[in-house]
Image (cartoon, helix red, strand yellow):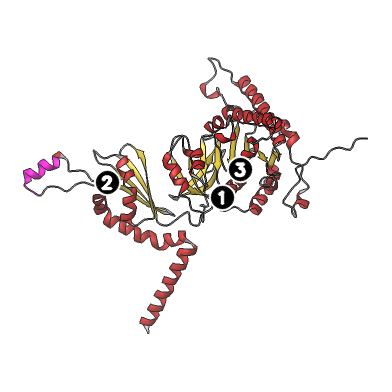
Amino acid sequence: MWGETLLTLSLVVAAGAVVLRWLRPVWYWLAFGALFTLARVMFTYASVMEACGLTVPPSRARLLLARAMRSETPANRVPRLLRIRITRTGLVLRLGLRPGQDAFDIATSTDRLRHSFRMHGVASREIRAGVVELRMTGYDVLRRVQMPARTDAGVMRVPIALRDDGTVHYRDYRQVPHALNLGATQSGKSVYQRRLVAELAALDVALVGIDCKEGVELAPLARRFSALADNPDAAAELLDALVSRMADTYRVIRREQRVSSDVPDAEITADIWGLPDDLRPVPVVLLVDEVAELALFTTKEEEKRRDRIVTALVRLAQLGRAAGIYVEICGQRFGSDLGKGITMLRAQLTGRTAHRVNDEASAKMAFGDISPDAVLATVQIPEDRPGTAISGDSSGGWVRTRTPFTSLRHAVSVCNAQAHRTPELPELAAFCPVLPPLEAAETDCSPSLVKPRPVTE
């Protein structure tokens, strides 16, 4: 009787664990996987480090002491295990390196450590001299992305995706002011942009959009945009207005610098973030969807317009940071085949995000000049995982990320709820989208972008 009950209970628990592992991998890890994995790591730590070649010979003092005591030769020493911590995605080990060891030795052994500890992924980073942190994931965190409830968001810093080591990937505009977002059709590039707009909607920032696909991507979110252009002609005028705003902002900064011997260093500024709150202009994020539509031309007039657009974008990317203007450019390709000035513009885009691409040349457009390893990782992104991307910057570092799916309906709802935060910019008033009242717009997610013409007698 008791045996049958115990067997039934065991089967129920096992079935529940299997279902939990599939539907809620975080809960399964915290309930079952973390304890078993922690015990396995603690029990096999020394043998794994020795098998992976992460040991050093005993010190000369210990050898002399063993020889004097006529005892056995001491064994090789492994890195000290300073701390171990359980997270919602895996384990974090902090190791103290022995004399003669290098953080590079740990970094090159992460794949061997992953197999030895039977973890899904292992990443290492140097905390300080002599201390290395191993972040191990117990399951595939990118298979079903679940962003943590609490994030470290801040001023011009928003959570945008989840990294393959279980940490949150942020888009920090004050640290990386301008960025490039590449990706083929159905790669998740538009979802990334949609997620970015939804996160920025809750900040005190002006959103300016250029969407030459008749506004199909950004027009539904227009209630949170201070200005929007849906064709190249309007885009050229909008960019000129942004350049004029940038020049006016620099005049304000120059007037308020007050560089003199009696002014404290903390009050001298060269950007908008050092200005008093009542004088600081609202920061602007410019989102360009499908940049190739701005660079293509067939006639002489269109070529002149194209040169005008690219020149304005280069100026904004070179000088816009201090004026609080940040550029976010999206496209399928971004190479020299788009004409002169494009490579100059790309050199100003510090942040790089590449989703699945159709060829290696497209990946090289994003990372070829900074990290060959990132190029290889980009071309290996599978088709069945939209939203997966390689994110890096001009330093050469890169990580694998995946953006959580954000539906257009959700992004529209967020933008409508945050519509009261939309600032009015006098310089861009001519490009402000004309929208119906919110009650009437609830049944239509495609607001008109055409300004009504007054009736003249």
Q: Toward which corner of the image does residue 291 lie, by quadrant?
A: top right
Dot 3 crowding, Cα within 10 Å, few <14, some 14–19, many 20+: many
**113 within the magenta span:** no
| Element under disc 2 | strand
- Left/right placement of residue 244 relative to residue 260 reads right
Q: Which residue is mark 2?
A: 80
Pointers 1 and 3 in contact (CB under 8 A)?
Answer: no
**69 within the magenta span:** yes
Residue 93 position in % (x across, y down): 34, 49
Is residue 321 among what the camera can see? Answer: no
Residue at 31% over, 59% down: 39
Pointers 2 and 3 in contact (CB under 8 A)?
Answer: no
Amino acid tagged 1: Gly
| Element under disc 3 | helix
- Left/right placement of residue 212 relative to residue 38 reads right
Residue 240 position in % (x across, y down): 68, 29
Tally the numbered discs: 3
Indicate the quadrant containing the N terminus: top left, top right, bottom left or bottom right. bottom left
**Front tag of 1 and 2:** 1
Between disc 2 and disc 3, whose residue precedes?
Answer: 2
Q: Which residue is mark 1?
A: 188
Residue placed furthest toward the bottom: 1
Q: Which residue is mark 3?
A: 200
**Front tag of 2 and 3:** 3
Amino acid tagged 3: Leu
Residue at 44% over, 46% down: 377
Between disc 1 and disc 3, whose residue precedes?
Answer: 1
- The magenta stretch is 61-71
Above or below residue 153? Residue 13 is: below
Depth check, front residue: 184 or 76: 184
- Left/right placement of residue 407 relative to residue 261 reads right
